[in-house]
Image (cartoon, rainbow, N blue to C red):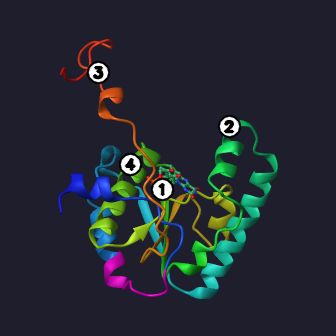
Amino acid sequence: MGVLELAARRRSVRRFRAGGVTLKDVLRILEAARQAPSGANWQPWRFLVVSDSGLKARIRAAAEEGERRFYERVSGELREWLQAKGFSPEKPFLEEAPFLVLVFSQARAPYSVQSTWIAVGYALLAAEELGLGTLTYTPSDPAKVAEAVGAPEGLRLEVILPIGIPADDKPKEPRLPLSELCRMNRWDNPCWSG
Ligand SMILES: Cc1cc2nc3c(=O)[nH]c(=O)nc-3n(C[C@H](O)[C@H](O)[C@H](O)COP(=O)(O)O)c2cc1C
């Protein structure tokens, strides 16, 4: 399957089956991630792969503490969107998924956030190629989670990727058509006619 098909098929997964993933699968995903381009080729991404259930429980506890505080103060459009989608501070996927990959960026690197997220994009497509589900879960209080895993100074937690066999059948969210997103040379000129 080519990149276009993988990108079109990929969706966020928030419930996972136990098992069905090996460390070899996870390393294959990270092999793709490390090929990403980065500012000054700094390669500022660092990965903590977690399979230990005790550590997953500590990560979940730290993450949910931050989520509870976030849900208390969130308001407006975002609050409505979260409610409509049924989101809550509970993050069971942090214990359900056979593997978690915590993705960190080196804070002092040039363009560390942008570069690290490109690597995340590569990882998502590689997981899709293996038939594995993922989620880009961005904890509300990433520093708390980083502390729970004893992350070295200078590393900033960007995202947690739970990886496993999907156990939900929630469809992919709709995407805007390219005709709405793309203009050619002038802002009033669509990328194609007809
Ligand atoms: C930067 C970023 C942060 C996200 N953070 C979260 C998150 O914290 N929790 C969550 O459930 N989904 C999170 N998502 C997933 C989005 O909600 C999801 O990609 C979007 O709704 C489209 O759905 P789809 O991936 O199923 O097509 C995040 C996605 C991105 C790109």
Query: Is residue 43 at all visible to an observer of this figure?
Result: no
Quadrant position of residue 76: top right
Q: Identify which residue, 168 or 30, lies in the foreground.
A: 168
Nearer the observer, 194 or 46: 194
Residue pointed to by mark 2: 77
Residue 188 x, y percent position in the rendering: 32, 11
- Res 105 label: 1
Q: Residue at x 64, y 45 (%)?
A: 81
Q: In the rendered view of the protein, which quadrant contains the C terminus?
A: top left
> Ligand 1 within 8 A of label 2's CB?
no
Instruction: Work out whether 177 lies above or below 144.
Output: above
The label number, if any, that marks residue 60 in the structure image: none
What's the distance in space between the residues labelled 4 and 1, CA to CA? 9 Å
Q: Circle 3 — which element?
A: loop
Real-space Cα separation, disc 1 to disc 2, in angstroms: 29 Å
Amino acid type of disc 1? Ser
Instruction: Give the labeled residue for mark 3.
Output: 183
Classify mark 2: residues with Cα within 10 Å, few (<14), some (14-19) or many (20+).
few
Q: Which residues are magenta?
A: 17-26
